Amino acid sequence: MSPTMLFTFVIGYFLLLLGVAWYTSRNSNNDSFFIGNKSSNWMIVAFGMIGTSLSGVTFVSVPGAVGRDAFTYFQVVIGYLIGYIIIALVLLPLYYRLNLTSIYNYLSSRLGFKSYKTGASFFILSRTLGATARLYLVVKILQDAILTSFGIPFWVTTLIILVMILVYTYEGGVKTIVWTDMLQTTGMLIGLVVCVIYILNTMDFSMASALQAMDQKGYTNIFVTDPASKLFFLKQILAGAFITITMTGMDQEMMQKNISVRTVGDSQKNMIVFSVILLVVNLLFLFLGGLLYLYAGTQGIDATGDRLFPLVALDHMPPVVSVIFIIALISALFPSADGAITALTSSFCIDILGMQRRTDWNDVQKKKNRQRVHLVFAFIFLLFVMVFYKVNNPSMIGVILKVAGYTYGPLLGLFSFGILTKRQVNDRLVPLVAVISPLICFIIDKYQAQLFGGFEIGLELLILNGLLTFTGLWIISHDQQKTAL
């Protein structure tokens, strides 16, 4: 299908998003932007969070990684399920009991003001890097598939997409995103199912015969039993659980949607339902990856990794399937960027600027400052996407999980220390601990072959980082009872 036709469908989809945004952002205010007036429907939030959690990286990178790692990513997904259950039972009741708008306010009341600022700062760094990496992957595919033929530079493509996102999130914030995420998740899942059905029919496969063919190629292997391997199943499951606890339960973007639900019970139902659906959807993505490699083998397609799915969908499938792929890809793009910019704006306004504590700003001034911050983060996203464009890593999911290991580790340590102990930290030293821990992890990761021989550290780097932060906090802390002496 011609790039012009594909571009027409992209514009049509965006106009649909604008219509939803206009309808949902009427009479919006700062509470609408930050927490959706605590009136979101838990079923809508649960369904929409699928799109936010998966993003374009899952849509492209997970199927592409099957050729290298088979179905071993499902080990991590099992860990995700465990992590979501812990969030539902431990973190959500805590956030609702404290009636938080920003979850990092917990750190202020439990550990101190510096700890609070440290947690919020690491979230801003983590989410900025992760969201821009996800955004880069999808923008790159759209650039190669459509906009290069029009002579439009990559930076202009990125700018256009960010402007699109700004247009429909500028007023409504979370109140709008809850509904646009539902629409985008629908588009993504339709694309996934259509591509699976097309390849099955083209290759005359049933689900069972396709799995048999994948098994012969070694694609269906899930569990790795070698303890020295970075893919060892216990490492992967444990890492998956902690990735979820930190990247969802200690992440303002994911949690502000959950705490926009009216009651903690409904929010817990949202989390459990969402986690089960996500388990099934990730398995379907892995199945699609196996199908893509089987199809590529029969068609003589020379592509692997992140290049495989876009190449097959756009150059070797009928035009109608190509259109559905592009719509699904855009549906995967927007939830990972719109929610991130909104959450970063919320966290910066509340946690860094102290908007809720400011008595010298009226509501109009608060709204203007919030909108300025929103624009600044969009510009920062543009800069970081251009950095990823220059680096051009072949598999972005590995990059994102590696970045998470370094940047979410301090958050894991801070929240764990606050929840699991009753000790009081020396608040002034907390930022130092939170910086030193990732630096130690970087050294360990860089020289792990010399330090551990054949033993490989993979995704569990996040756990190590959190443990180092926890230990550092313990060293600079004392028992609360001693403060009364």
Image (cartoon, rainbow, N blue to C red):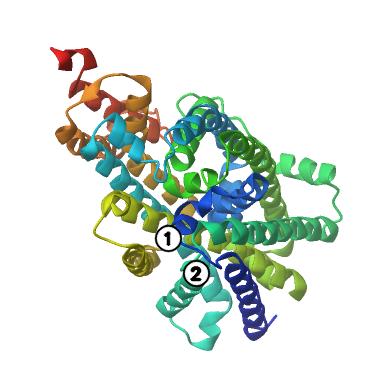
Residue at the disc numbered 1: 341
> Crowding near pointer 2: few (<14 within 10 Å), some, many (20+)?
many
Q: Quadrant of residue 202?
A: bottom right
Q: In the displayed structure, does residue 484 sit left or right of residue 275?
A: left
Name which residue lies at 67% across and 38% down.
273
Please tell me which residue is depicted at 46% across the width and 55% down the height of the picture. Answer: 31
Give the number of the disc on residue 311.
none
What is the x, y in percent for residue 102? Answer: 39, 45
Q: Kindly identify which numbered label has been placed on residue 165.
A: 2
Answer whether residue 371 is visible to the viewer in this image: yes
Mark 2 or mark 1, earlier in chain = 2
Q: SS at mark 2?
A: helix
Q: Secondary structure at mark 1?
A: helix
Quadrant location of the N terminus in the rendered image: bottom right
Is 251 positioned to the left or the right of 194 in the image? left
Image quadrant where one finds the C terminus? top left
Tell me how many marks there are.
Answer: 2
Q: Which residue is at the front of the view, 245 or 105?
A: 105
Q: Residue at x 46, y 75 (%)?
A: 163
Q: Amino acid at mark 2?
A: Ile
* Residue 193, quarter of picture: bottom right
**Distance (Cα) linking label 2 and label 1:** 9 Å
Q: Is residue 213 left or right of residue 225?
A: right
Q: Position of residue 271 (x, y in %)?
A: 60, 38
* Contact flag, marks 2 and 1 (Cβ < 8 Å): yes
Q: Hey, which residue is sitting farthest left in the picture?
A: 485
Answer above or below: position of 280 versus 13: above
The answer to whether one can see residue 61 in this image is no
Which amino acid lies under the numbered mark 1 shown in the image of this protein? Ile
The image shows residue 20 at horizontal and vertical percentages of 63, 68
